[in-house]
Amino acid sequence: MSIICDHVNYIYSRGTSDEIHALKDVCFKIEDGEFIGIIGATGSGKSTLIQHLNGLLKATSGHIYINGEDIYDSDYSLKKLRSRVGLVFQYPEHQLFEETVLKDVCFGPKNQGLTSTESQMRAYEALENVKMGEDCYDVSPFDLSGGQKRRVAIAGVLAMKPEVLILDEPTAGLDPEGREEILHLLKSLHDEQGITIILVSHSMEDMADYAERLLVMDKGSLIMNGSPREIFQNSAILEEIGLSVPQVTGVLREMRQKGFDVDISATTIEEAADSIMRALGL
Amino acid sequence: MIRDITIGQYYQTDSVLHRLDPRDKLAGTLIFIISLFVAKNVTSYAVATAFLIAVILLSKVPMSFILRGMKAVVIILLITVLFNLFLTPGITFVSFWKIRITYEGMKTAAYTAVRLTYLIIGSSLMTLTTTPNNLTDGLESLMKPLGVFRVPVHEIAMMMSIALRFIPILMEETDKIMKAQLSRGADFESGGLIKRSKALIPLLVPLFVSAFRRANDLAMAMEARCYHGGKGRTKMKPLVYRGSDYIAYAVIIMYFVLIVIAQRVGML
């Protein structure tokens, strides 16, 4: 499912003293099946941007096309859009409300109008996807650990079978193991089921490892759009807007300055290791 | 949607009214409210109107912002006006079918509408120009004499300031949870009363859970900073009256005297 943002502007609290121009003339295109990363400092408009993509916020001006259809057309069903573009908010575990895990995951599919058996089938599948065992289906979601709650909440959106999955910092506040699990889950959803993933994150390492293309936001504008390799070449710009390059890229840059012939465009640990080995002639 | 409610909100700007001591504004608001109930004729209402307009201009809060807060109470206002209009006995002005509008009804309806509107604008001007912290400081200071009767003044003030502090947080939280549930296909807007109230469960349960979590965190943070109630607690910024505050007291008392005089000698 392709997504096109066409000169999107968004202004918060328009006409009051605390008016904020949160999105400025944002244009981009996302193709079917891509793994997109959105990076930017706090307050750069990332969260505002993703809320536009499933119609929760309406652009002050500009258009958004999903599969070529303008979502601001009066006969476009936002409810349908939301079941095709799944949005997982920051700390999604804060949205859990049902008595049991299974019931909570069924909430989305039921809202889509599926019967209760169908909803349960979807829920089983989604819970299996996020590696939640059968023993927890009848447990109250409030009795789970932080990482488990997060996975259940993500399952709640997955159960709606979205074609595009957008996640706002899904790994925030999780331990390293929990982070890895979530990121692996996203990768397998992308690789095996062909779901388009849009990931907002502050971890440059995660972005280098997983994203195919990065969108860089700064003060409401989209300032860069390209592969992680290309983006992380511009360490000066990134540092200026409060971001950084992956640690290994930083290390390689320092090595280059010290006279080693390494490839400073490497962004992942594997690439860096290869490049260093070659430079050392090993 | 939720952002539109401006009652109890603070409007950040710099004006004479913003700099005034909160005790002044609290007392002034109280006197203004009393004056609205004293006023019963056109002349006294004219005085109140002039005073209100002067205060609005002094506050530098844009009129559109104040009126936006009125939107939330327009229904209550309408119901009150209609009740007064149709149910006040007196000399008939027009009557059709079973409905009868009297001269007295029209008069009370008009006065009630004006009174309620002024009441809301007057009190929201106070909250618009006073930060919640200042407001509770003022309240605590004004209520201090009640401490003699073992009224836990500090605790009440603390509870108030925490409650006020939580309003915007909970609103934001509501907004967030609402969006999260909308993303999962929840529908808060269609269906009958029962369906709609049921649709609120996915919103209210997480909201309560988060309110308790936040309250717990806050209690912990307060204890970690050695909070142990009001005894022996001093203020970082104690309230001190300045020259302009005395002038404000004088103005508000003069205003009240004027209202009383207008009420006595005025027409209608």
Image (cartoon, rainbow, N blue to C red):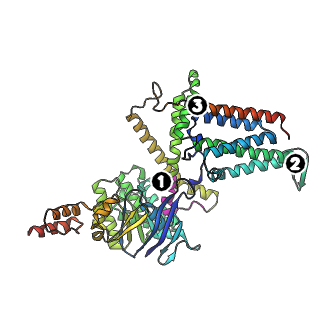
Which part of the image, by quadrant, shows the N terminus of chain A?
Answer: bottom left
What amino acid type should be assigned to the residue bearing mark 1? Answer: Phe
Q: Nearer the viewer, mark 2 or mark 3?
A: 3
Q: Would you say A221 lies left or right of B152 here?
A: left
Q: Is residue B50 visible?
A: yes
Nearer to us: label 3 or label 1: 3
Q: Disc 2 versus disc 3: distance between alpha carbons? A: 50 Å
Q: Which mark is residue B102?
A: 2
Instruction: Identify the secondary structure beneath mark 3.
Output: helix
Find disc 3 in the rendering and name its residue: B243
Quadrant housing residue B252: top right
Q: Residue at x 51, y 42 (%)?
A: B165
Magenta residues (range): B174-189
Q: Residue under mark 1: which chain is it in?
A: A
Secondary structure found at label 2: strand
Q: Judge whether residue B178 is colored magenta.
A: yes
Question: Which labelled disc corresponds to residue A97?
Answer: 1
Is residue A83 rendered to the left or right of residue B66? left
- CA–CA distance between discs 3 and 1? 55 Å
Query: Measured from the top left, where is residue A29 in percent x and y?
Result: 42, 74
Write the residue at 56% across / 24% down. B147
How many neighbours does mark 1 have within 10 angstroms: few (below 14), some (14-19), or many (20 or more)?
Answer: many
Q: Type of residue at label 2?
A: Thr
